[in-house]
Every structure is written in structure tokens, then in C-alpha cells.
Amino acid sequence: MALKRLLTEFGMGSSLRRQDYTEAASRAVRDALWHNSINLAELYGKEKSEMQITVEVGVQQPDQIDTRTIRTLFPYGQIEVIARKGGLDVPRSDGGKPTVIANVAISVALDVEGTA
């Protein structure tokens, strides 16, 4: 198997008042995905289901991410979600819950052995 990363996309999302790390991460994924339509699998004569998609999510409290929810945002491919410490919690002057900012990096790889 010659798995090769072919694409990386980046996104940012936020949860303004609810301190919902999964929602901020979901918005970051949508930010990265909804701005493009790249037909990588077809370029290599592969099925979309063969795409290996790695989603790295950075938030201040990575244990608060529901990775199953993030995986459901992808209509195809083999999805791995990795939650890491990162992003930003922005304190609110009114004493409410902080605004959560999530960053994501989505990498797409395919087994390209034997393809031109």
C-alpha cells in the first residue's frame, strides 16, 4: 500500500456563548469543507469510500469533543478524528461562558500505488 496525503484543508469555527467544543469543531470542519469541491478519488480512479480522511481538531478542552459527531459530517471516506489541545477560549467581560474557537486540519490520503 502506498498511502499518500494529497490534500490538506484548514478551518475555524466558534461557539459564542454555550462553550460547546463539539459545535465549534463542527463549524470548523464545515468551514474547511464547504468552500471546495475536490474530486481527488476520481482523479486516481478510486472510489470516494477509499479516501483516508484525518481530522485534527484543536480546542482548549479536547476531551469535550464528541468525535462521533464530527465523523458524521463526512458523507464518505474512512474518517479518523484526533482531538488535541489548541484553539482558544476567549473570556467574556460579562462573566459568561467563554467563546470557544476551534481549529481543524483535514488531510485526505489515498492508496495511489499503481496509479498514473
Image: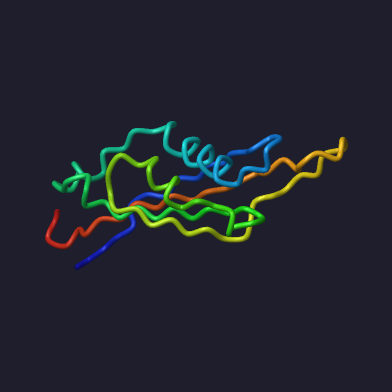
Question: Which of 91 and 107 lies nearest the eye of the viewer?
Answer: 91
What percent of the width, then of the height, locates residue 96? 80, 39
The image position of residue 33, as x and y in percent, is: 42, 37
Count of numbered tags: 0
Q: Is residue 46 left or right of residue 38?
A: left
**To which quarter of the image does residue 16 belong?**
top right
Q: Would you place residue 63 above or below residue 35 in this image?
A: below
Observer-nearest of 66 and 7 = 66
Residue at x 65%, y 44% (from the top left corner): 101
Residue name at image x 87 percent, y 37 percent:
93
Q: In the current view of this chain or complex, which residue is farthest to the bottom?
A: 1
Q: Residue at the spot x=26%, y=38% of the render?
A: 39
Relative horizontal placement of residue 1, taking residue 96 as reference (left or right): left
Query: As displayed, is residue 17 above or below residue 104?
Result: above
Where, quadrant-wise, is the N terminus in this rendering? bottom left
Near-viewer residue (34 or 40): 34
Percent across and percent down for residue 92 are 82, 39
Position in image of residue 89 (x %, y %)? 72, 48
Q: Relative to residue 97, is residue 21 drawn left or right? A: left
Please name the colour scheme applied to the rendered image: rainbow
In the depicted structure, whether residue 63 falls above or below residue 49 = below
